[in-house]
Amino acid sequence: VRILGICGSLQAGSSNAALLSAALRHAPASVELALYGGLAALPHFNPDLERAHTLPEVDALRAAVASADALLIACPEYGHSLPGVLKNAIDWLIGTGELERKRVAITAAVVHPERGRAGLAALRTTLAAVSAELLFDAPVVRTGDPAPALAALFAALCSAPSGRE
Ligand SMILES: Cc1cc2nc3c(=O)[nH]c(=O)nc-3n(C[C@H](O)[C@H](O)[C@H](O)COP(=O)(O)O)c2cc1C
């Protein structure tokens, strides 16, 4: 199963990036997890731009998402919503359909189990717009051992596709 990991934070010391690093270490043998690193280089979403130019960063994002069987998004909460940089990336994918019916796990590295949930809810709303198949949706407390949550996350992402069993 090819999974693309996307971190919604650009901070060098990001706890969500650390969670994705832990996911690399804990990925089952059947999983090929690659991390997308292009979020900061994407232009601000504007359909006019691609009418005028080829946008290599956007093409690379679309190709990476299209070639993945599933996505793992680690997403901090900012202002009770998802980070603008992550919404920007998703906006580039909405019109071209790479996220349609894509299998997705969303999580957030948080200091307390009740934190980060509004960010995940906002991300869920956006992913519903493209009929993504949400298979895991829960924050992970960053002070604890992430292994049990990551095992549940990978089990959900690697489960038999619905309707195709
Ligand atoms: C400007 C700003 C706004 C934030 N807003 C929220 C918020 O609304 N809810 C929340 O739970 N955490 C909020 N946080 C905390 C971040 O989600 C938290 O620092 C998170 O760990 C950042 O992700 P990262 O460690 O992957 O960079 C905010 C942090 C900053 C700097």
Image (tube, rainbow, N blue to C red):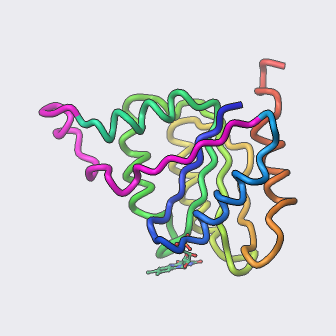
Q: Say left or right for 143 vs 53.
A: right
Residue 98 position within the rendered picture, expressed as x and y whole percent measured from the top left: 48, 30
Residue 47 position within the rendered picture, expressed as x and y whole percent measured from the top left: 23, 39
Residue at the farthest right position: 148
Q: Quadrant of residue 97?
A: top left
Query: Considering only vertical position in the picture, is 104 above or below 139?
Result: above
Quarter occupied by the N terminus: top right
Residue at the farthest left position: 52
Residue at image location 54% in from the left, 51% down from the top: 6
Residue 73 position within the rendered picture, expressed as x and y whole percent measured from the top left: 59, 52
Q: Would residue 36 be counted in the magenta stretch?
A: yes
Residue situated in front as seen by the camera: 165 or 71: 71
Residue 24 position within the rendered picture, expressed as x and y whole percent measured from the top left: 69, 51
- Per the rendered image, the range of residues in magenta is 31-54
Q: Would residue 117 be counted in the magenta stretch?
A: no
Q: Say left or right for 153 vs 65.
A: right
Residue at image location 74% in from the left, 49% down from the top: 136
Residue at image location 74% in from the left, 54% down from the top: 25
Q: Say left or right for 62 vs 136.
A: left
Residue situated in front as seen by the camera: 38 or 49: 38
Quarter occupied by the C terminus: top right
Residue at image location 57% in from the left, 35% down from the top: 131
